[in-house]
Image: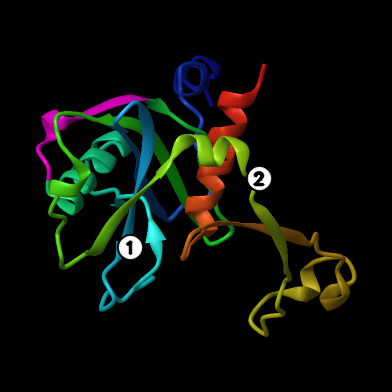
Amino acid sequence: MDMDYIIRKIKNRKPKPMDVKYKYAVLVPMIEVGSRWELIFEVRAKDLKRQPGEISFPGGKVEKDETYKEAAIRETVEELNIAEERIKVIGELDYLVSYNNSTIRSFLATIHGINVDNMHPNKSEVDHLFTVPLEFFIKEEPNVYFLDLHIVNNRDFPYSLIPNGEDYDWQQGKHSVYFYRYGDYVIWGYTAKVIKHFMDIIKSH
């Protein structure tokens, strides 16, 4: 193998997460209400197959030949039923590589020239919208709980090829789950995790 060929293939290559099968993007939309900024949340339609009735930011699966940012904007336009010109992306927040072979990237943006009370989201995907002042999340720490992640033995796995076979000491993990309560709303899971990391960024010195 020619070393120059290897160098050309590796030197300027951008690294990416291994084993990612599913790619998702979300937008974290902020809107100015009076003299303060608030986050817009969706309550997902109750007849959706995935996560019906749960609280989320607009977002979804990245389509072929589409960037994460483009997917986040497209999904927001479709779900909030607003013009793309209303969206101004500020930048990208931290992203998640999940235990279920998926990666989710989130983008902070502002929504301009529209009153949230006059927004008419796509009813096939969104039951209704609500907003929460940014100051609430700055002051309020979420509750955090942990779920243990375990390896489940698979009879098709070649245990005879690894030390100690089925008794191999696999590394275990923990999955953190965040919860915020705002009135009657429970904001949890990935949505809450994005908020928590966003708050950590703006509160850091």
Q: Residues within 10 Å of mark 2 (few under 14, many from 20)?
A: few
Quarter containing the C terminus: top right
Q: Which amino acid type is marked by label 2?
A: Glu
Q: Which residue is mark 2?
A: 141
**In the rendered image of this protein, does residue 171 appear above or below residue 97?**
below
Q: Looking at the image, is mark 1 or mark 2 earlier in the sequence?
A: 1
Q: Residue 44 or 2: which is nearer the viewer?
A: 44
Identify the magenta region: 82-90
Q: Residue 3 or 192: which is nearer the viewer?
A: 192
Work out whether residue 201 can be spotted.
Answer: yes
Whether residue 156 appears in magenta in the rendering, the answer is no
How far is the residue under mark 1 from the one under mark 2? 22 Å
Judged left or right of residue 81, residue 109 is right
Q: Which amino acid type is marked by label 1?
A: Val
Q: Residue at x 48, y 60 (%)?
A: 183
Image coordinates for residue 31, horizontal then vertical, percent: 29, 34
Q: Which residue is mark 1?
A: 43
Q: Residue at x 53, y 51 (%)?
A: 192
